[in-house]
Amino acid sequence: MPTPTQLLARLDAIGQALASSSHGLALIGLGSVGLERERLDQWSDLDFFAIVEPGTKPIFMHDLGWLAAIQPISYAFQNTVDGYKLLYSDEIFCEFAIFEPAELPKIPFAPGQIIWKAPHVEASIALPQLAMPAPNQHQPEWLVGEALTCLYVGLCRYQRGEWLSAQRFIQHFAVDRVLELLNYLPTFSLAAGDAFANERRIEQRLPELKPLLAQWVQGYQASPASALAIVAFLAQHTHVDPTMHSLIERLANEAL
């Protein structure tokens, strides 16, 4: 896997390729290659915005030669109307979007870092004009209710033989609600996470949660055991309706 030094060198090379295109305006590094470089490691990818002159975006979108000139491309596909996911032959992975300046005010993103910009371009181009979406501010009672009902529905699906659906309700949807709930539990001190994906870096933000996660997410065939672990955690840290608690435990134990 590429080293952080190699990743940053590739990002600089992409900036220079954009500069050499004669139509580039700026390259903005995002995430771990933006303003959060303390978490850059060999498993990181290159997230960036390429800002190009008005009217030239289709050129950059339809011909990736400006990127292939740096290193051969092993794989690429257009995953949004604005950008691509791309794998270089040396296993450097990129996820990027291409914008013209007039599009940026409509795009929510975390502040980035200028990798390269044309001399006449203001450095403020790396700052979003549209605020990032606020994280959900669901109340604890709602989160507990959603988690309990997801456990119940998942166990019913499991008993019906819909094990994949059960896995999603119990080990995905219910767990998502529990992760949100942690913000309200004084026993846990959860550092701020990704605005788009609360599960990102959860093991680093709250290391003591790892043994619990192993109990909550036990796999395709273990949804009943996962449900028992989740409801036990909820009962330990919150008020759980006795009827739902009893019903979830009964259904889970019957399915073991």
Image (cartoon, grey):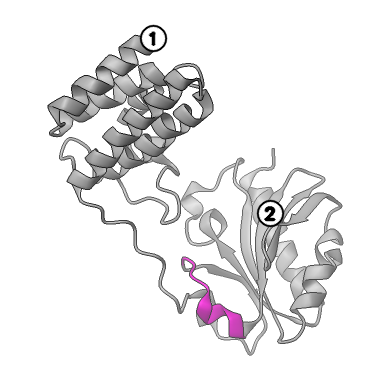
Residue 251 sits in quarter: top left
Checking the image for residue 152, the label placed there is none
Specify which label sits upstream in the sequence, 2 or 1: 2
Under mark 2, the amino acid is: Cys
Q: Is residue 212 left or right of residue 122?
A: left
Q: Nearer the viewer, residue 209 or 4?
A: 209
**Helix, strand or loop under label 1:** loop
- How many other residues sit within 10 Å of disc 2, few (<14), some (14-19) or many (≥20)? some
At horizontal 66% and vertical 51% (from top left) the residue drawn is: 7
Q: Which is closer to the viewer, label 2 or label 1?
A: 1
Q: Quadrant of the N terminus?
A: top right
Under mark 1, the amino acid is: Leu
Highlighted magenta segment, given as a residue range: 102-110
Q: Nearer the viewer, residue 193 or 72?
A: 193
Q: Is residue 51 visible?
A: yes
Q: Position of residue 165 (x, y in %)?
A: 49, 31
Q: Nearer the viewer, residue 243 or 175?
A: 243
- How many other residues sit within 10 Å of disc 1, few (<14), some (14-19) or many (≥20)? few
Disc 2 designates what residue? 94
Q: Position of residue 126 (x, y in %)?
A: 53, 74
